[in-house]
Amino acid sequence: MGFFKKLKKKFVKEDEHVQEDSGKKEDVDNLEEDQTEEEDQDLSTSTEEEEVQEDVNEPASEVVVEEPSKEEEVVEPDTTEYVQDEQEEQEEQEEVEEVEEVEEKESISTKFKKGLAKTRNSFATKVNDLVARYRTVDEDFFEELEEILISADVGVNTVMHLIDELKMEVKRRNIKDTREVREVISEKLVDIYYGDDDEEIEEITFNQDGLTVLLFVGVNGVGKTTTIGKMAHRLKQQGKNVVMAAGDTFRAGAIEQLEVWGERVGVPVIRHSEGSDPAAVIYDGIQSAKSKGADVLLCDTAGRLQNKVNLMNELSKVKRVIEREIPGAPHESLLVLDATTGQNALSQAKTFSEATNVSGIVLTKLDGTAKGGIVMAIRNELDIPVKFVGLGEKVTDLQSFDAHAFVYGLFADMLEESEQE
């Protein structure tokens, strides 16, 4: 089975399932409207009957209560109809709840397709134009493809590796038609991302014996505090008891911003006054989380001090405090990067990985750039997994990174074209 067909089988069917659920929602909405109309009619009829009854009834001088004779059978009221009504109402309620759950949980493939629209429009347009201009796969074709990949911020080293892999694969499969190369590109992007690792979505490493501490690092302006807020919502939806610690005491408004997120997602925030010691805030955050019996503590950190040395020293101090209070923590050190900064994000990743043991990348604002190839560069050149990506502004738009869904988002239009050809 071709790689495009595998993607279509995995993700397009998922979209169709979501569309079916949307259709189900419309049916439920129509059913609710019909029920409301019937209830209104029944209420109207009942009111009219009561008015007529009041007009014809006159007060009786004597009330006679008739008791059933021994010969007459006492007829028990038939409750079958009421039981059926209750069962129908319960089934309808379950159906409504199912539809509401579908509305909240948009398919992963749809989120990646929407979030990568800018990158896809730029990348796909250039690749399609290249394919249209070349009838056969030759050296000139690969040179232009190399330029397209570099312009998408895939990274020079990654591009060179990818081009070498493509050339070998094209030769092995004896591909002559340039249109067939598009599918090989998508397949090799996934292969390069995972390398020798298993093709699994990398999730958060949780502490099985107590409090899990997630440390978020990154320079100011990358969306670090917003990411922490969205992560708090995500974990809370999974049933986790979450606490946030406002460790960025240097940036003006950082504490207040995290408090706003805390109110929004219903998670407590541990804070000190602006300019106080970040390590002291994290210490209090740990003690508070333990006393509350929390599952996860999310730690915000400073993004800019007087210089890089001070920033890294401060992060090292915070980390020592965490390790002292909870052996083995932090269980994740997540570096937040802004996808719109392109190769500058790669430089930041190198700097932070030298100072802290970065376990994963959170790549924000992927929906706001046409250069989403930075995902491949970070993974290939630094060997650090991209664990989460920001695909929009909604609180639910922080998604676990899936290389297959990423490639699907990049090649969705081409995939549809290949089906039509």
Image (tube, rainbow, N blue to C red):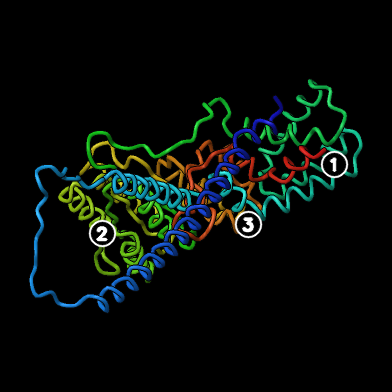
Q: Secondary structure at mark 1?
A: helix
Lateral position of residue 195 relative to residue 172, left or right: left
Please report whichever mark, 1 or 2, sits nearer to the chain's N-terminal start. 1
At label 3, which amino acid type do we have?
Thr
Residue 157 seen in the figure: yes
Q: CA distance from mark 3 to mark 1?
A: 24 Å
Residue at image position (23%, 57%) is 280
Which quadrant: the N terminus?
top right
**Position in image of residue 190 (x %, y %):** 62, 33
Q: On the image, numbered disc 1 is attached to which residue? A: 131
At label 2, which amino acid type do we have?
Pro
- In-front residue for pair 284/108: 108
Residue at image position (36%, 56%) is 301
Quadrant in the rendering for residue 206: top left
Q: Secondary structure at mark 2?
A: loop
Foreground label between 3 and 1: 1
**Position in image of residue 196 (x %, y %):** 56, 25
Q: CA distance from mark 2 to mark 3?
A: 33 Å
Please report whichever mark, 2 or 3, sits nearer to the chain's N-terminal start. 2
Q: Is residue 239 above or below residue 307?
A: above
